[in-house]
Amino acid sequence: MLELRGLCKYFHTPGGMFSSDRKPIRAVDGVSFKVHRGEIVGLVGESGSGKTTLARVVLGLTEMTAGDVIIDGIDLGKATRQDMKKLHSEVAVVFQDPASNLNPRQTVESSIMRPMILHKVPKEEARKRAGEVMDMVKMDRQYLESYPHQLSGGQLQRISIARALALQPKLMILDEPTSALDVSVQAQILNLLLDLQDSLHLTYLVITHDLNVIRYISDRIAVMYLGKLVEFGPAEEIAVNPAHPYTKSLMDSAPILDPELRGREKKLLTGDPGSLVKIGKGCRFCDRCDFCEDHCRKEEPKETDFGDGRIVFCHHPLIDVSAPAGTKDVAV
Amino acid sequence: MKKKSYRRYSARSESLRMCLHNVDFMVGLIMIISVILIAVFAPQIAHYSYSKQGAGPRLTAPCAEYPFGTDELGRDVFSKTIYGTRIALWVAALGASIQLILGVTIGLVCGYYGKWVDHVFSFITDLTWCIPGTILALAVVTILGKGLTNVVIAISIVSWASFARPIRAKTMSLRNMAFVETGKAYGENGFSLMFRYILPNIIPSIIVMTSMTLPETILSTTTLSFLGLGSKSPSPDWGLALSKGMEYITRAPWLSIFPGIALVYTTIGFNLLGEGLRDVLDPQMRSR
Amino acid sequence: MQELKSKPESKPAASEYATEPEGEASAAGTKNDELLKLENLSINYKVHDGYLSAVNHVNMTIRKGEIFAVVGESGCGKSTVAHSILRLLPDKDTKITGKILFKGQDLSTFNEKQIEKVRGRQIGMIFQNPLDSLNPVYRVGTQVEEAILLDNPDKAAAKKKTVSLFRDVRLPDAELRAESYPHELSGGMRQRVMIAMMLSRTPELLIADEPTTALDVTIEAQILDILKRLKNTYGTSIMLITHNFGLVAEIADRIGVMYAGEMVETGDVFEIFRNPRHPYTKLLMQALPRRSKKEGRLKTIDGMVPRITDDKPCCRFANRCPSASERCFKESPAAVDFGNGHICRCFEAEGAESVKVNG
């Protein structure tokens, strides 16, 4: 459904008057992974890991620096006008902040109808469809008449999802869809998203920093650190038995939901995520990693495939690498 | 939860209700409506044509027949002042329209596209701000030639920047809002994003800014008319009346006093209206 | 507050904690152990159609050296309670009744000067967004020094203490960081500076209002670690206000669950996680995503938090409660003690084993 191949996005810092070398900020640097049709892939990472930038590239909101993005067989880099139009209707998005997701000056109905009008759906049909998608997200149709400021955060987020569904998308990008919501509302939205995915066979790319949410909702998880993909694989595997030291620390930091687990052994990260500007040659996680050795600083780790669909970028993965043969050579 | 029926009641109707409770707004509104009524019914109110010479004796002090007195050519000052409202309102309307169109378009384009477009226009804006407005307007009038319309155009060219700046800033902050990004992701083009998504959200600010620039435009035009660049006699322009009145200020102060009062009345009316609107429409002051 | 006599808990609440746990706390004697005690605290905001009940008859006790977490969803009044303790609510249109006892003294009777002496020195507070709490034009070290100089006018010592405090909160390169301006620090570092600033005056109680909500999980874990160590080394009591059950499970000793301005359940953290009594607490815990979707959908709570302007007796959760009976809409449930300080306000939870506290 979605395939990223060596995706890069560099931003340029406004250089000073006398600085000749303007260092690019490598927000996303050579990320490759595939999202299959009908699955939910979670993308996690700290702030500054490039996960939102990645989403913006997929949505066509910003141009990539290098690499390929292939959505449903269309190469984003070589897409024609016709292709772009198709993509706009096939890829939908829901952002984090319920309050700014809808145009405050438009009724809910016109907000939902707008994407359809844009894609040449006749007005009457669009109106009918607006009612249908409201039913799908379990909102009363009377709210079609209201303005965003009259609704609660949970209701707004439902409407944002309704609008996303209006054009019958195939891929939905959900950027922190529940971060701004209360626990009970979050549960409603997560259930709704899962129900919709089941009934409409949607593909989701969910971006969030909430590890419990991502573990709950995802089939596979991609972990990013400072613009790089560090680990990618089945959700439970990654949550229970992470291979990359960063993933391990991330999972250890996840809030526990049982005080009995308090004494558990955990590996907390020290320091902040480093800067994207000052990046050395080697592994980007070096400064915070316990297993860091000389060659980690010099050499970027290569992809190690663990066979069970798990990919790790590390010189010293935490789990036994006995499964696939030959990976040892790559790692050392 | 009780089911509330959400009819098409919008933020607008709420604003309207708040406006009606705002003293500044109401006083300003009444003042401006009275000016508009006077302008519309000027022929009915005035006894004489504003340009009719010898309507009475020269330089008569205010009396029952000539409530505001007469001028050096025997024209009725009352009639001139009444007809002057038409000029003032025309100036306000024309000036505001030009400034709105220039300021809003440029502000939106700069704020939305950023980069070199923004650099170029910001430079121009900065430039117009560096030169004193009146002097720049004088220069423009010299190029365009004298005349009321040219004066208004000159003033608008000088002051559109005060529109463009805040609109640019607001556009920049709205540009990255989720609903704009979502629209972009659906394939909306820049024009649609600017005018359909962003513009409606800055209309309250535009209304406030417009009502604030109206009196400024009237005053600046009056100034240039006073300097003899605007209307020519026998126009009932207040600025012209003031400048002519200066010659007779000791002998016949009514020549300048009454047009002066009319000018102050109109500008205060617009100012109050603007302040009232700002109180109501400014999102910082407004509680949900 | 006397106008609300009908409420069951308007009796002197001293008896409320009569059945204190036999743990380490009661060994030192219950009375002296109480650092902060809220008695029947009610806060009403004046709105255009009457009074909005933001907090209603809240009772809670924070003991010395414990972390008490106030948990609840947005709009449940948890921040209002915290702000009322240091009188940070707008005076206008706010009506506060009840007692705020800090070491036996009622803070609500203090005048502005007296309360200023309590702020910072005895009760410190940190907020969700540390950038708003730091002055952007001064170096962070200077700001912490200023706080120290308020009590002790020795400049050199203040400087030294600042650095050692920065080390205490595990700020990397403490000396160097003291020279930084707030904008040069990351969110996690700023929150550390705030904690250091609060610690500089060694308050007995630290109120932390959503201290990690704006931070990444990894940083959140670090901050929690610091708070935990504070409690252990300085014996500071912490009132942790949060909507995140994860934080609660991680560091709290006791918790209070708030709903629509009322404290619906309080008790020991282990007890409440193991055996929640109030339907709201139960539902809230089941609404948290754990493990994987393969284990089924999450439990949800239908409806919305009511906006309460009238003082009709009823259970405020009744309209969303799956097990609400008619009685719940007509009477306010009393606080029931299940022993061990586990108090719950619910008719359903009233079992045979329970002892009614009052009402």
Image (spheres, coloured by chain):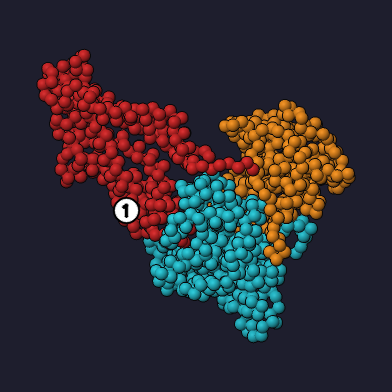
Q: Please give left or right for residue B139 compared with residue B118 in the image.
A: left
The chain coloured red in the image: B
Q: Chain of mark 1?
A: B
Please name the residue that numbered disc 1 is placed on.
Answer: B121
Instruction: Locate residue C329: give its quadrant.
Output: top right
Q: Residue at x 80, y 44 (%)?
A: C348
Residue B189 shown left or right of residue B62 in the figure: right
- Label 1: which secondary element: helix
Residue A175 in percent (x, y) is at 56, 60
Give the chain ID for the cyan colour. A
Q: For this rendering, which residue is in front, C62 or C321? A: C321
Q: Residue at x 82, y 41 (%)?
A: C336
Q: Colour of chain C?
A: orange
Check the picture and name the quadrant holding the C terminus of chain C: top right
Three-letter residue code for mark 1: Phe
Q: Position of residue C19 (x, y in %)?
A: 86, 41
Is residue C352 visible to the viewer in this orientation of the structure?
Answer: yes
Around disc 1, counting alpha carbons within 10 Å, would you say few (fewer than 14), some (14 to 19), or many (20 or more)? some
Q: Residue at x 61, y 52 (%)?
A: A181
